[in-house]
Amino acid sequence: MSRNGTSPALRHIDVVLDAVHSPSSAGVSTVTASWCRSLLHHGLDPGTGAKRARVDLSTLGQRRSEHAALLAVAAPVLDQVFRSVGRSGCGVVLSDPTGIVLDRRVGAGDAAEFDAVGLVEGGRWGEAEEGTNGIGTCLFEDKPVIIHRDQHFASRNLGISCMDAPLHDPQGRLAGALDVSSYRQDHGAAMAELVSALVRDAARRIERDYFCMHYVGSRIVFLADDPVHGTALLATDRDDLVIGASRGARARLKLSDAMLRAPRPLDQVLGAQSRGPSFEDSDRTALRQALAQAGGNASAAARILGVGRATFYRRMARAGLSR
């Protein structure tokens, strides 16, 4: 069929195909790079009329169970965001890391439109299924995105504007995407920017609450609120050894999983110069910090504390620590 029609859908298909086949297209922007992935890597058709992908109820239940902690933390934030944007026709959506919709908030008058395009629980919005879109592209890029109407890959999604931010778990891994979508034609680019700021802030709140819930009972150390990597938080145990770091803290302090595998003193993680542990402090704290600093070597830990190995072992036994 000729692509020379005048309908918005046909014009959009021409724009997408021209951009993808341009020699420099992938390096132009996030959107054109995503268009290239959608067509060339995933083999999608921008004019597709295929049935929208959706997982069955059993799979949805399994995914919701796997992400139960995230859903519990996110629920009140979703409610709050929806109270802010719902009356303007926006819907609030939470997906898992593969783009499967786990939860949503939409107004009764807007539900039919969201149902029709597959923005429902179980809907699949990864780039592999729908091409360039707010949820899928946000997950691929692992950063906030705005996909405004004709920036979508599929012509059937031209009526949607999507504002998204990624969500990360307490170990800094990608856990899903927070999405606000709208069908309102009077929602232009300026409105999208305002909503996007709201989405980014809500995503940071969810990540903070998720981290604090995971490390409940620990001391939470606030370092900074990074608009790119999220809030930088550390979790320490009662002996002030670091047992957890948020994505923001990992980025800020250049911490890897390997570096966090064994608890280390807070001052050491922060790079602060301290006098070192002393028996003037709590015995247990001093012993554990010295052991952590010495990589678990009792002889080296004893030297750090300035005592003999036999004395060190007696102190360990008194503090209830095993060799």
Image (cartoon, rainbow, N blue to C red):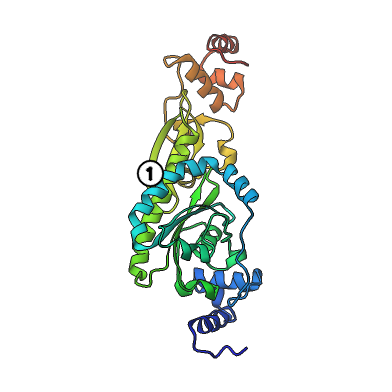
For residue 189, say whether it is visible.
yes
Name the residue located 40 percent from the left edge and 47 percent from the top edge.
77
Quarter occupied by the N terminus: bottom right
Against 216, residue 101 (above or below) is: below
Task: Give neighbour class at mark 1: few <14, some 14-19, many 20+ (Cα, 10 Å).
Answer: few
Instruction: Locate the C terminus and report the quarter of the image it occupies.
Output: top right
Assign a secondary structure to mark 1: strand
Picture coordinates of residue 300, whole percent (x, y): 58, 22
In this orientation, does residue 227 appear? no
Q: Is 83 in front, or is 36?
A: 83
The image shows residue 188 at horizontal and vertical percentages of: 35, 71
Quarter assignment of residue 318: top right
Q: Of 38 and 125, which appears nearest the observer?
A: 125
**Tally of numbered discs:** 1
| Left or right: where 198 falls relative to 133 | left
Q: Position of residue 177 (x, y in %)?
A: 50, 54
In the rendered structure, which amino acid carries the disc numbered 1? Answer: Ala
Q: Is residue 214 left or right of residue 44?
A: left
Q: Position of residue 241 (x, y in %)?
A: 49, 28
Determine which residue is flagged by label 1: 224
Is residue 266 positioned above or below 319 on the image? below
Answer with left or right where residue 82 lies relative to residue 211: left
Question: Residue sitting at 42 percent across and 68 percent down?
Answer: 183
